[in-house]
Amino acid sequence: MSVKEAIAALSSGLCFYDGTGRVLLLNEQIENECKELTGESLYDGKAFWTFLTEGKTSDKTKITQSEGSIIVEYPDG
């Protein structure tokens, strides 16, 4: 199994991006999360990380930071 296939199989969202925010590698889970939270595809990893760390969600979605990771909890559980 390739690294890309292994990342795609994860149930957690995963995104690697460079210093400018250009996405280098992501899986479908994080793409879906980005669309759910922002309404857009994930093109800028740095901007999405900032969005998450600032907790800019408009609904009752809860965003928690833990050891360099983000945990997103939706109202429906």
Image (cartoon, helix red, strand yellow):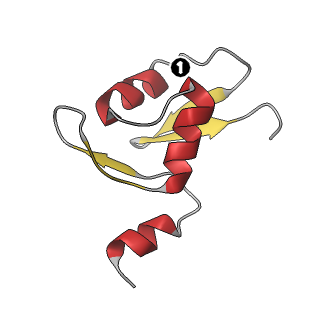
At a point 65% along the width and 14% down the height, the residue shown is: 58
**Pick the front one: 40 or 53:** 40
Residue 44's image quarter?
top left
In the depicted structure, whether residue 38 falls above or below residue 73: above
The single residue placed furthest to the left in the displayed view is 19
> Helix, strand or loop at disc 1?
loop
Indicate the position of residue 18 as horizontal and vertical percent values: 19, 42
Q: Is residue 66 or residue 77 the one in the foreground?
A: 77
Using residue 47 as the reference point, say whether residue 38 is left or right of it.
right
Q: Measured along the vertical axis of the image, is residue 27 above or below residue 41?
A: below
Seen at 43% across and 66% down, the residue is 7
Horizontal placement of 70 versus 48: left or right? Answer: right
Q: Nearer the viewer, residue 48 or 43?
A: 43
Task: Report the quarter where the C terminus lies.
Answer: top right
Please tell me how many numbered marks the rendered image carries. Answer: 1
> Which residue is the site of mark 1?
55
